[in-house]
């Protein structure tokens, strides 16, 4: 896997007591990056698996029971929900847990369809979460490299780098000038 500009920043951010929501297009490496950043997650739900998705669609309260069954530790256990948009009610379960004890767990939810969640009226945890967008490695076009000298310098500093091997950007990062199209 290629390195990503966001890794060091996200490693620090994911240690704070907020819910982190990571959205990005399919096949941008969201799950791979999260597995790399959070290798010791206490709970990892992957709703791309049909059986697991079906279980949680029937009973999203399973997450509440599973999290309450975890020991309270320092640092708090990390709960990752991959493809969270597949089970919109999981956001309500996360809100219930977070509102009950903000420091007992760290939640990271990721998915590829923020639009689907907005259309269904899903709870996106307002006031409780930070939203991050992971762009594909090809998000920097040649024109973007001309406009952003820092990106061009990074691309040119690696002899093996090409535009298709550019990393990604975090829209929460204050000095990232690239914003993905809406």
Image: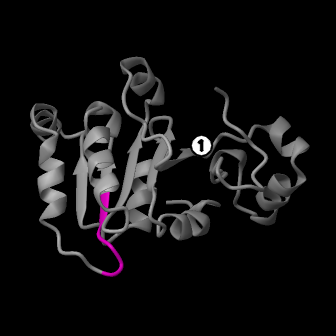
- Is 13 positioned to the left or the right of 113 in the image? right
Q: Quadrant of residue 13?
A: bottom right
Residue 177, position as x, y percentages in the image:
79, 47
Q: Quadrant of residue 125?
A: top left
Residue shown at 48% from the left, 46% from the top: 22
Residue 71, position as x, y percentages in the image:
18, 74
Nearer to us in this view, 150 or 38: 38
Residue that badge 1 annotates? 135
* 84 inside magenta stretch: no
Give the main secondary structure of the magenta stretch: loop
- Is 106 positioned to the left or the right of 29 in the image? left
Q: Secondary structure at mark 1?
A: loop
Residue 124, position as x, y percentages in the image:
43, 36
- Is 165 positioned to the left or the right of 22 in the image? right
Residue shown at 12% from the left, 33% from the top: 54
The answer to whether residue 3 is seen in the rendering is no
Residue shown at 10% from the left, 37% from the top: 59
Nearer to us in this view, 25 or 55: 55
Residue shown at 71% from the left, 39% from the top: 179
Residue at the far bottom: name it.
74
* 75 inside magenta stretch: yes
Query: What is the span of residues highlighted in magenta in the rendered image?
Result: 74-79
The answer to whether residue 107 is seen in the rendering is yes
């Amino acid at each position: 896997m290629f390195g990503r500009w966001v890794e060091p920043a996200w490693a620090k951010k994911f240690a704070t007591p907020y819910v982190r929501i990571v959205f990005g297009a399919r096949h941008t490496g969201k799950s791979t990056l999260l597995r790399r950043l959070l290798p010791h997650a206490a709970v990892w739900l992957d709703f791309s698996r049909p059986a697991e998705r079906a279980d949680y669609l029937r009973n999203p309260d399973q997450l509440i029971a599973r999290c309450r069954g975890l020991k309270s530790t320092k640092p708090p256990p990390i709960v990752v929900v991959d493809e969270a948009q597949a089970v919109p009610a999981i956001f309500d379960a996360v809100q219930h847990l977070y509102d009950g004890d903000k420091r007992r767990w760290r939640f990271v939810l990721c998915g590829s369809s923020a639009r689907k969640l907005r259309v269904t009226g899903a709870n996106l945890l307002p006031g409780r979460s930070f939203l991050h967008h992971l762009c594909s490695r090809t998000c920097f076009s040649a024109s973007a490299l001309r406009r952003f000298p820092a990106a061009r310098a990074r691309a040119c500093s690696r002899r093996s780098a090409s535009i298709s091997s550019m990393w990604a950007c975090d829209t929460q990062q204050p000095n990232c000038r690239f914003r993905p199209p809406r």
